[in-house]
Image: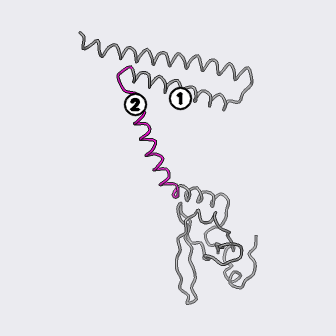
Amino acid sequence: MANWFDVLVPAIEAMLIALGAWLAMRVAHHLIRKLTNTYSLPGKVTALSLRVVAFVVYGGALLWALERMGVSGAVLWTAFTGFATVGAVAFFAAWSVLSNLFCALLIYITGAFRIGDLVELLENGEKPGIKGRVVDINLVYTTLHESGDDGGGTTLQLPNSLFFQRVLRRWYGDTEREANSGSTPRS
């Protein structure tokens, strides 16, 4: 009977904690709705407030229930900080990829250039830089074809974020003659 008592009491305590959290959320939900109606607050404020309160109440209830079942707070804190550290390292490792994905989205939205345009990335001001015809825009790279004097050429894959770090000169459509003759690009 003593063995069942050691399991039954923490289980009942955990259920009472969950019931208390549920009741606390019902009261919080009622109070927040009443404040929203009284002060004519936007629906987004209500939703955000409910989410924050739910996170605090249910998070606290979970930690309290785990403590009543014998899980050490120090162990939970160590696990949380370990996961947070790994998540932060993974985020910083993926930062350049995420930056290029976001810049690809900006290239499409802003229409900075399109496939077929002749573009040049200037180092600073009028100093010549990388120049070529856009042949592909994907989520990470923009591919430029550089024409050589011998009729051949090379293909360059530039990270999308580079187009937002440098000055971009753009010639529209099939205007390579204008670009090579030195005339100004049209807007």
For residue 89, above or below residue 186: above
In terms of sequence position, does the residue under pointer 2 or pointer 1 come before the other?
1
Secondary structure mostly seen in the magenta stretch: helix
- 8 vs 130, left or right, is left
Could you say where residue 170 lies in the image, as x and y percent from the top left?
Answer: 68, 72
Q: Nearer the viewer, mark 2 or mark 1?
A: 2
Query: Which residue is depicted at the point 56% across and 67% down?
Result: 142
Could you say where residue 138 lies in the image, as x and y percent from the top left?
Answer: 54, 63
Q: Quadrant of the image for the C terminus? A: bottom right
Query: Which residue is depicted at the point 41% across and 28% down?
Result: 73
Q: Which residues are magenta?
A: 68-97
Q: Which mark is residue 137?
A: none
Q: Amino acid at mark 2?
A: Ala
Q: Determine if residue 119 is in view.
A: no
Could you say where residue 161 lies in the image, as x and y percent from the top left?
Answer: 59, 62
- 78 vs 179, left or right, is left
The secondary structure type at the circle numbered 2 is helix
Q: Determine if residue 40 is in view.
A: yes
Residue position marked by numbered label 1 in the rendering? 55
Q: Residue furthest bottom?
A: 150
Residue position marked by numbered label 2 in the rendering? 74
The secondary structure type at the circle numbered 1 is helix
Q: Quadrant of residue 164?
A: bottom right
Q: Quadrant of residue 104?
A: bottom right
How crowded pointer 1 is (Cα within 10 Å; few <14, some 14-19, many 20+) is rated as few
